[in-house]
Image (tube, grey):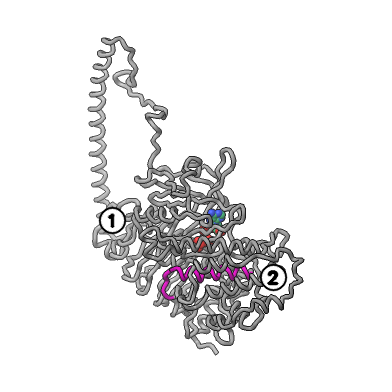
C-alpha cells in the first residue's frame, strides 16, 4: 500500500516517463518506483530512502530527448537530493526547484536547454553542486551565495551581463564561466565596463533602471574620450617614429654611398611607407596570433577546437614519460590536422579518435578533460606526469597532454580492439559476434589483475606511498581496453583527484562498493570490489543495470540485472553453473576454473572491505587458474563432476548477503 506522497511521486515519474518516451525506461519503470519486499526490483536511475520516497533521479547519457518536465511534476519530489540528467538532448527551460528544498546536486549539463537560470535557485539552501554547462542558456546569473555550494559551472552557454560579486561565486574560477561571450566580470573573458559594488552585490545584473543607464552612458563617454586621447597619442608617436626613421634613412644612405654598397630600403619615398612581409626562416620563425583557434572536423558535426594556449606551455603537446618516443612522430599541428571521430563521452568529457595521415595512417585517442577541480596549472601537470610515469605492460598511460586557458586535452594510444565492455556484450545474437572464449577471458582477467596489482604496489612517490599505492578509482569494463593482440590495458587510473567532487562521485556507478556509497572515497579496497564486479561481468556475460543505461542498447548482453545480488542468489540456491555465460559454459573442461574465478569474484565483493583480499593476493589466485577446455567438443566432462570438485562455498555467500 503506497502513501499519498508515494503515489504523487509515482505520478510525477510517469509524467517524466511519458515526456521522455525512452524505450528502456518504458519497459524498466513498471511496478512501484521504490523496491519493497514484494517488489524487490529497483527502477533504473531512481534512488529511494528507507521510507520509500524518491531521493535521486539519475539518468545520464541515455539519449533522452524532448522537453524537460514542467515545474508541476517536480512539486511531488520533496525528498529529492540528486537530479542528474547530464549528457542527453533535453530541450525547454530549467524547471523551478522551489519545492525541492533538500536538493543537493543538480546536473543538467550537456543538453539543449534554453531560457534563464531560475532566480529561485538562490534559495536552495542545501545545494552543493550546480552543473549547467554546455546548454543554450540565456539571461543572467542569479546571485548564488549558498555556503553549501562547492561546485558550479555555467560555461558554454549564452549568459550575459555581470557575474554577481557574491563571496561564493567569487570562489569559482574562470572555467566555471568560460565561453559566455556576453558575460563580464573578473572570471569572465572580459571585465565589465560599468559595475558598482551595489549593483553586483544586490543580485547581479540588474537591467533597465534609469540610474543604471545614465551611469552606463557617462562611462561610455568617458571611455570614448580615453579612446580618442589614446588615438591622438598613437598618431603623434607614429609621426615621431617616421621622422626619426627618415633621419636614420638619410644617415644610412650617406654612410652606404660613402662605402659604395647598394641601398635596400623599405622606404620608397619620403612620403610613403610600405609594409614588407618577411617569410619565416630559421632565424625569424613565424609568429602565430596567440588567440587563433584551430579546429578539427569531427564526425556527426562536432568540432574539436583548441583555444588560446597557456603561456607556460606555448601551445605545445607536452609528452609524458611513456610517450617520449612518440614526440618525433607527431606534434600538435599533426593532431589538429587529423580527421577525428567521436568515441564517446565519459566522466571526464568527450573522447575522440584522431587519425593522422603521413606515411602510414596513425591513430591516437584525444580526451577532452572537463569538469576538473579548480587546480593550479602546476597541480594539474604534476598529477598528469604522475599518471604518465606509471609503467606496466597492462596499463595504458597517456602519451601527452595539452593545456590551454579553456582546453585540456589528453592524448593516448588507440587500442585497436576497443573496450572490454563491447568485447563481452557486443554483437550478441548476430553473425558479427566473435566468440569470446574462456581462455581469452581468463587472460584478460589476469592482465587486469597485473596492472591493478602494479598500481597498488607502486609506492615509488611520496604521494603514492602515503595512499598505500595508487587506487584506480574508476575501474569499469569500458576502462579496460584491448590492444591488437587482445592484451588487456587498464586505462583512466589516477584521475579521481583531478575531478570536481560531484563529477568524481558519478564515476564507476555500477562498480561501487558499499563503503564507497557512504564515504565517497576511493581506496585499494574499493578497487578490489570493482575488480570483482569486472570478473562477474566476464563470467556471466551480464550487464549490470547501470552499464545498460550508460551504454544504451549497444551492449545487448544476456539481460540487465543487479549483477551482485543475482550471482549471490544463484550461488545460495545452488544453480551456480547457470550463471555462467553460455558462450563459455559449454567449454565444460574449463568450468572448474570458471567456478574458481567466480569464487574469487565473490571474495572481492565481500561487503566488509577488511574481508576482501589485497590485489597482490588476487593476482596470485587468478594466475593460479589454468585455462583448459578450449573447444566445444570437450563437453563430455560431466557438469556434476566439475561441480563436485569445485563447489562454491555458501558460507561466503551468506556473509555477503546481497
Ligand atoms: N585509448 C583508447 N583506445 C580505444 N578506445 C578508447 C580509448 N580510450 C577510450 N576509449 C573508448 O572511448 C569511449 C569513451 O571513453 P571515455 O573514457 O571518455 O568514457 P568511458 O570509459 O565510457 O566512461 P568513464 O570516463 O566514466 O570511465 C569508451 O567506449 C572507451 O572505451
Q: 84 or 347, which lies in front?
A: 347
SS for callout 1: helix
Residue 569 colored in magenta in the image:
no
In the rendered image, the vertical position of residue 504 relative to residue 277, given as above or below? below
Q: Which residue is drawn at 51% across and 88% down?
A: 3
Q: Residue at x 27, y 59 (%)?
A: 210
Q: Examine the rendering and report whether any part of residue 137 can be seen.
A: no
* Mark 2 Cα shell of 10 Å, populated few (<14), some (14-19), many (≥20): many
Residue 104 in percent (x, y) is at 40, 73
Residue range of the region highlighted in magenta in the rendering: 518-540
Say if mark 2 contacts mark 1, CB within 8 Å. no
Q: 78 or 53, which lies in front?
A: 53
Quarter of the picture holding the N terminus: bottom right
Residue 459 in percent (x, y) is at 40, 61
In the rendered image, the vertical position of residue 500 relative to residue 80, given as above or below? above
Q: 118 or 343, which lies in front?
A: 343
Q: Which residue is drawn at 60% across and 73% down?
A: 598
Quarter of the picture holding the C terminus: bottom right
Q: Residue under circle 2?
A: 585
Residue 35 in percent (x, y) is at 55, 82
From this viewpoint, which residue is outermost toward the bottom? 1
Q: Residue under circle 1?
A: 213
Amino acid at each position: 500500500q503506497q502513501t499519498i506522497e508515494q503515489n504523487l511521486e509515482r505520478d510525477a515519474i510517469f509524467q517524466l516517463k511519458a515526456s521522455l518516451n525512452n524505450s528502456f525506461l518504458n519497459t524498466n519503470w513498471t511496478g512501484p518506483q521504490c523496491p519493497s519486499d514484494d517488489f524487490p526490483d529497483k527502477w533504473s536511475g531512481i534512488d529511494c530512502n528507507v521510507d520509500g520516497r524518491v531521493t535521486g533521479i539519475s539518468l545520464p547519457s541515455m539519449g533522452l530527448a524532448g522537453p524537460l518536465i514542467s515545474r508541476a511534476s517536480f512539486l511531488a519530489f520533496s525528498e529529492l537530493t540528486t537530479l542528474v540528467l547530464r549528457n542527453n538532448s533535453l530541450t525547454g527551460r530549467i524547471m523551478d526547484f522551489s519545492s525541492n528544498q533538500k536538493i543537493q546536486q543538480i546536473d543538467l549539463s550537456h543538453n539543449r536547454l534554453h531560457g534563464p537560470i531560475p532566480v529561485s535557485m538562490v534559495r536552495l539552501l542545501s545545494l552543493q553542486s550546480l552543473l549547467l554547462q554546455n546548454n543554450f542558456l540565456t539571461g543572467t546569473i542569479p546571485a548564488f551565495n549558498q555556503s553549501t555550494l562547492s561546485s558550479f559551472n555555467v560555461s558554454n552557454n549564452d549568459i550575459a551581463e555581470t557575474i554577481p560579486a557574491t563571496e561564493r561565486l567569487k570562489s569559482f574560477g574562470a572555467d566555471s564561466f568560460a565561453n559566455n561571450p556576453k558575460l563580464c566580470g573578473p572570471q569572465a573573458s572580459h571585465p565589465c565596463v560599468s559595475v558598482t559594488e551595489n549593483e553586483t552585490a544586490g543580485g547581479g545584473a540588474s537591467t533597465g533602471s534609469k540610474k543604471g543607464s545614465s551611469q552606463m552612458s557617462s562611462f561610455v563617454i568617458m571611455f570614448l574620450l580615453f579612446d580618442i586621447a589614446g588615438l591622438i597619442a598613437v598618431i603623434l608617436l607614429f609621426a615621431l617614429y617616421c621622422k626619426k626613421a627618415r633621419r636614420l634613412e638619410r644617415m644610412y644612405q650617406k654612410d652606404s654611398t660613402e662605402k659604395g654598397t647598394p641601398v635596400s630600403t623599405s622606404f620608397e619615398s619620403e612620403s610613403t611607407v610600405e609594409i614588407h612581409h618577411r617569410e619565416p626562416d630559421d632565424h625569424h620563425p613565424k609568429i602565430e596570433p596567440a588567440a587563433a583557434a584551430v579546429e578539427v572536423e569531427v564526425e556527426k558535426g562536432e568540432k574539436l577546437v583548441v583555444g588560446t594556449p597557456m603561456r607556460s606551455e606555448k601551445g605545445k603537446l607536452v609528452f609524458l614519460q611513456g610517450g617520449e618516443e612518440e614526440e618525433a612522430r607527431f606534434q600538435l599541428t599533426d593532431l589538429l590536422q587529423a580527421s577525428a571521430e567521436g568515441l564517446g563521452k565519459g566522466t571526464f568529457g568527450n573522447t575522440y579518435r584522431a587519425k593522422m595521415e603521413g606515411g602510414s595512417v596513425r591513430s591516437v585517442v584525444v580526451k577532452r578533460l572537463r569538469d576538473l577541480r579548480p587546480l593550479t596549472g602546476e597541480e594539474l601537470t604534476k598529477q598528469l606526469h604522475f599518471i604518465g610515469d606509471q609503467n606496466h605492460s597492462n596499463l595504458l598511460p597517456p602519451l601527452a597532454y595539452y593545456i590551454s586557458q579553456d582546453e585540456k586535452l589528453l592524448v593516448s594510444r588507440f587500442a585497436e580492439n576497443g573496450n572490454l565492455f563491447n568485447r563481452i556484450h557486443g554483437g550478441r545474437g548476430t553473425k558479427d559476434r566473435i566468440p569470446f572464449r574462456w581462455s581469452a577471458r581468463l587472460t584478460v582477467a589476469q592482465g587486469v589483475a597485473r596492472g591493478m596489482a602494479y598500481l597498488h604496489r607502486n609506492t615509488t612517490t611520496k604521494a603514492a606511498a602515503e595512499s598505500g599505492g595508487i587506487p584506480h578509482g574508476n575501474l569499469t569494463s569500458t576502462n579496460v581496453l584491448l590492444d591488437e593482440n587482445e592484451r588487456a590495458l587498464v586505462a583512466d587510473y589516477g584521475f579521481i583527484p583531478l575531478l570536481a567532487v560531484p563529477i568524481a562521485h558519478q564515476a564507476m556507478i555500477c562498480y561501487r562498493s558499499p563503503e564507497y556509497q557512504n564515504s565517497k572515497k576511493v581506496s585499494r579496497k574499493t578497487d578490489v570490489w570493482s575488480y570483482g564486479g569486472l570478473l562477474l561481468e566476464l563470467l556471466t556475460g551480464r550487464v549490470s543495470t547501470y552499464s545498460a543505461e550508460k551504454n544504451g542498447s549497444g551492449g545487448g548482453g544476456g539481460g540487465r540485472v543487479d549483477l551482485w545480488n543475482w550471482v549471490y542468489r544463484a550461488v545460495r540456491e545452488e544453480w551456480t553453473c547457470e550463471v555462467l555465460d553460455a558462450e563459455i559454459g559449454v567449454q565444460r573442461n574449463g568450468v572448474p576454473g570458471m567456478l574458481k574465478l567466480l569464487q574469487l569474484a565473490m571474495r572481492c565483493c565481500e561487503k566488509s572491505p577488511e574481508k576482501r583480499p589485497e590485489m597482490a593476493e588476487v593476482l596470485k589466485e587468478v594466475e593460479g587458474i589454468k585455462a583448459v577446455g578450449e573447444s566445444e567438443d570437450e563437453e563430455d566432462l560431466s557438469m556434476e563432476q566439475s561441480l563436485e570438485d569445485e563447489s562454491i562455498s555458501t558460507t561466503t555467500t551468506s556473509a555477503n548477503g546481497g
